[in-house]
Amino acid sequence: MSNKIVLLPGDGIGAEVIYAAKDILEAISKKYNKTFEFSSYDIGGVAIDNHGTPLPNETVEACKSSDAVLLGAVGGPKWDNNPSDLRPERGLLGIRKALDLYANLRPVKGFKKLLHASPLKEDIIQGSDLLIVRELTGGLYFGQPSERLDSGNAVVDTLAYTRREMERIIDKAFQSAQLRNKHLTSVDKANVLESSKLWREIVEAKKAEYPDVTVDHVLVDAAAMKLITNPTQFDVIVTENMFGDILSDEASVLTGSLGMLPSASLAEDGVGLYEPAHGSAPDIAGKGIANPIAMILSAAMMLRYSFDMNEEAQAIEDAVEVVVNQNYHTADLKNDNGKVVNTTEMTQLIVNAI
Amino acid sequence: MSNKIVLLPGDGIGAEVIYAAKDILEAISKKYNKTFEFSSYDIGGVAIDNHGTPLPNETVEACKSSDAVLLGAVGGPKWDNNPSDLRPERGLLGIRKALDLYANLRPVKGFKKLLHASPLKEDIIQGSDLLIVRELTGGLYFGQPSERLDSGNAVVDTLAYTRREMERIIDKAFQSAQLRNKHLTSVDKANVLESSKLWREIVEAKKAEYPDVTVDHVLVDAAAMKLITNPTQFDVIVTENMFGDILSDEASVLTGSLGMLPSASLAEDGVGLYEPAHGSAPDIAGKGIANPIAMILSAAMMLRYSFDMNEEAQAIEDAVEVVVNQNYHTADLKNDNGKVVNTTEMTQLIVNAI
Ligand SMILES: CC(C)[C@H](C(=O)O)[C@@H](O)C(=O)O
Ligand SMILES: CC(C)[C@H](C(=O)O)[C@@H](O)C(=O)O
């Protein structure tokens, strides 16, 4: 059985970190006698430059016929003033929609050795370990109409969901909670939005199907506070696309090591796309100093979710832990007793630990 | 010249804190020989109970013919399962719309004596002093349609703005920045939303009118991170309604003393409504232990913005500072060397300091 992986390096540090992840997967392939088949396609800014579109058809086709996709990052100042349809982000939104990647899973868990870098006091952040489940293909970022009206003197965007779209992400979140600490926090703005009211009704109705999971509802504004004042109260958080965008980025800085956080975007029964929580970091691109760990841990998530290779995924996660505990780190992190290494050195250290 | 003030105590601790603020204003009245005329009306849950609607007409009329409005808080578990139009929050949204209170100003500034209570490390929060300017009467919380479709199997909410609505809040923010450190951060999601693109165009166009203000644009997800990792980088933040709801609540916990933060909601040339940043805190309502300071500082904002009484406003703010520096605090705050007082005692201490 072959495992076809499409690599989408994208822009900025994307290529640097994705080839680091490929090296790790090759180490896994040798050690565990697995076969991975890699191919590379353009997305984002580089695709605009090479093909005149942020999401070429051949990229979509390649992803559709693959078993999993690894994505580096998209975007950069070069394309910031492009018109909407020629922006790198369109590539990302487009591939999510094309592959129906409705479920974005973003685990946030600190490394003990790195918690000193958290902006939060240690007694607040210690022990936090949460998973944000964000709906990724509906809501305000996709709804129509999204346009100027009244000769450009008014504008409208649309937050639209079907019941079915809400149900599947809420199911996914309940199931994720069952695999963790069985506590689900649903985030909405049910005191104002009609969409949030339907969301809350569905969560309430689904409780019966998952009696082992305890559920609470938190308004999005309150959730933005609680993530900071008491992050350990959360296990799994589930929310719609835009709230999830904001809250998952907020959560990503709590542990102080954004460069270490992976993510998975999953379809119902199809490919998954795995990408680091961080962006394309154009300021350090090409210098060979990017932190590859978020991308490497995203590859581990791929092994677990798309290839059912739990042992192999664990081997990567353990290797990362070993290297971090040896005080090695890239330049994005501060550690008084640390040894600063570049992207290639970090990758080699993790390969050795595997 | 009389100054007609409508008091809207609302629910939970609302009444306790609003009568504390009234005591303070009476002290100011004596000391500075000013006349304030007070009247009280129902809003929120208490209005539902007494009048069958969260916003009775007489409340709206009284506010319209007043010079300023003080609001305590609305909401509580008693009304949580009511249908949409019988929820306390509708009263708040309704009065904002009825008075066209388009500009919500939320200053966030820590008290040196209380910064130890911040969830953030001291070196990160120290020196932060920011003002969030939130658009309050447009966007997703007011747009139509907001309804179920397809026999309840789909739902839609609408984020709608006119150019004019964006222009006036952006002007207000530029003007606020001119009175502070002349640095404006505009927050949007211009890489995805059409409304955010128009927003950003308007901010760019307005720069020329305020050449002394430096401007930057930050995406909402990035802003949610930067508030935590580097809050001192901000002076004035301006954003649309929903982003402002989330970010201002996020910002409100950074200094560790939510119970101290006031807010002002202003119309173009009409009354202003002043309320604490915190909610109705049903868990401690009726116990006489609520922190009245956010409400008292909201009254100070009223003196400054609606009555042009700068000296009097400053007198209140100074008195609060004096009492805080004497280590007095209410039970919501922790302070190892502190002296815990109740609502009445705290109010009396501030009156004495005036
Ligand atoms: C680039 C942008 C469209 C994207 C989003 O908001 O979905 C990004 O912020 C993310 O969270 O993956
Ligand atoms: C109660 C609710 C409608 C309100 C809002 O979201 O506007 C509140 O959260 C606020 O921020 O003043």
Image (cartoon, coloured by chain):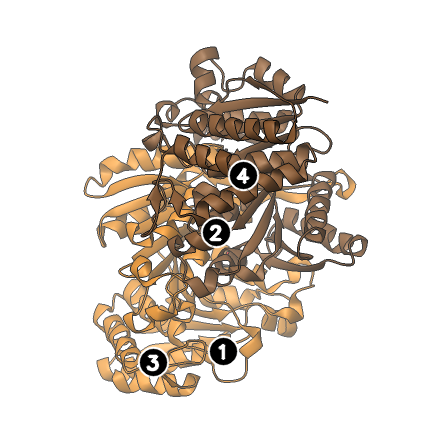
Chain colours: A orange, B brown
Left or right of residue B304, residue A347 in this image? left
Q: Are marks 3 and 2 on the same chain?
A: no
Which residue lies at the image location 76% right of the left edge and 59% below the top edge?
A: B212
Disc 3: which residue: A24
Kind of residue at badge 1:
Ala
Kind of residue at badge 4:
Leu
Kind of residue at badge 2:
Phe
User: x and y percent of residue B114 in the render?
Assistant: 42, 52
Disc 2: which residue: B111
Disc 1: which residue: A15
Disc 4: which residue: B297
Which residue lies at the image location 26% right of the left edge and 37% below the top edge?
A: A207
Do the residues bearing badges 3 and 2 touch, measured as CB atoms within 8 Å? no
Label 4 crowd (10 A; few <14 / some 14-19 / many >=20)? many
Q: CA distance from mark 3 to mark 4?
A: 57 Å
Using the image as rendered, state which of residue A88 and residue B270 is in the foreground.
B270
Tell me if residue A337 can be seen. Answer: yes
Judging from the image, mark 3 belongs to the subunit labelled A
SS type, badge 3: helix
Q: CA distance from mark 3 to mark 1?
A: 14 Å
